[in-house]
Image: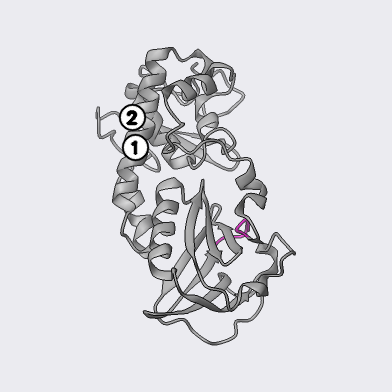
Amino acid sequence: MPELPEVAGLAKFLDEQLRGSVLTKLQLVSFAVLKTADPPFNTLEGRTVVGVRRFGKFISIDMEGVSLVFHLARAGWLRFTDSPADSQLKMGKGLIAVRCAFSGPDGPRGFDLTEAGTKKSLAVYVVRDPHEVPGIATLGPDPFTEAFDVDMLAEILRGSPQQIKGLLRSQSVIAGIGNAYSDEILHAARISPFATAKSLDRATVQVLYDAIHSVLGEALAEAEGKPPKDLKDVKRSHMRVHARTGLPCSVCGDTVREVSFADTSLQYCPTCQTKGKILADRRTSKFLK
């Protein structure tokens, strides 16, 4: 799933490519992805792009009073082109869910929103204000806003009995962090993914705060300026524990381990994060706290 750094990279790329362009054609290939009815999706055609913004993992393409907002979910992606095809796509066929074509001062531009797999969760909204999207309206603070300081993080953690891995992934608590970067942040902070949030002392909260900014900041810097087709590889190339089960930890050399759940998994280093203990592979087992 694209997370804050990749979504920020996509938003900046789209802003640079599309600002000032006119949306000439919008094809909704899968009606299931459209989550709004008013205003109608075809009201976007003929409008000029005035900017592209990121809200957590959402991207909003703003067009003269109406915005096209999308969330790529687990298996969605954006495929950009300088030569958008003019052909009419067949409904419900293939990976493409939405196709947009633009005309601007630098020539034609376009992109497809695609989604692989059988569990379809790509979401598209046409709204007058991005905050009309429920997922945006309920977002927690963005890690890179001025208000998000170590005191705010300490307050968030202080009253939560939730395990820290799940809390970091909760978009209503902190916006933009998902499964991959929560693994990376906890590894950098040397914290067990199953530590209880409210159990972390002030010194550990500071370490966690610093890890959030260092891990995400490095990933943001790497994503900046990259076209969409390169962002996935950039993300994978900088992971130290996530999706590296069975490989040596780049910090200590121990073997990266995995805990699997029904529809997801996490990775961690026992030496760096759990004092050498191996975490059980079922949520109902006795986890290290």
Vertical comparison of 125 with 79: above or below: above
Q: Residue at x 48, y 40 (%)?
A: 177
Percent coordinates x, y for residue 116 in the rendering = 54, 62
Q: How far is mark 2 from mark 1, CA to CA? A: 8 Å
- Asked if the residues shown at circle 2 and circle 1 are in contact, with their CB atoms under 8 angstroms apart, the answer is yes
Q: Residue at x 51, y 49 (%)?
A: 57
Residue 115: tell me if it is visible.
Answer: no
Residue 102: tell me if it is visible.
Answer: yes
Quadrant housing residue 20: bottom left
Percent coordinates x, y for residue 192 in the rendering = 43, 23
Question: Which of the two discs, 2 and 1, labels the residue nearer the N terminus?
Answer: 2
The crowding category of the residue bearing disc 1, from other C-alpha atoms within 10 Å (few below 14, some 14 to 19, many at least 20), is many
Q: Nearer the viewer, mark 2 or mark 1?
A: 1
Describe the element under mark 2 as helix, strand or loop: helix
Q: Amino acid at mark 2?
A: Ala
Span highlighted in magenta in the image: 116-124
Q: Residue at x 54, y 56 (%)?
A: 72
Please name the residue that numbered disc 2 is placed on.
188
Q: Which mark is residue 106?
A: none
Q: Which mark is residue 215?
A: 1
Q: Amino acid at mark 1?
A: Val
Describe the element under mark 1 as helix, strand or loop: helix
Vertical comparison of 6 with 28: above or below: above
Magenta stretch: dominant SS? loop
Residue 117 falls within the magenta-colored stretch: yes
Percent coordinates x, y for residue 5 in the rendering = 40, 48
Q: Is residue 91 left or right of residue 253?
A: right
Residue 85 falls within the magenta-colored stretch: no
Q: Residue at x 29, y 48 (%)?
A: 221
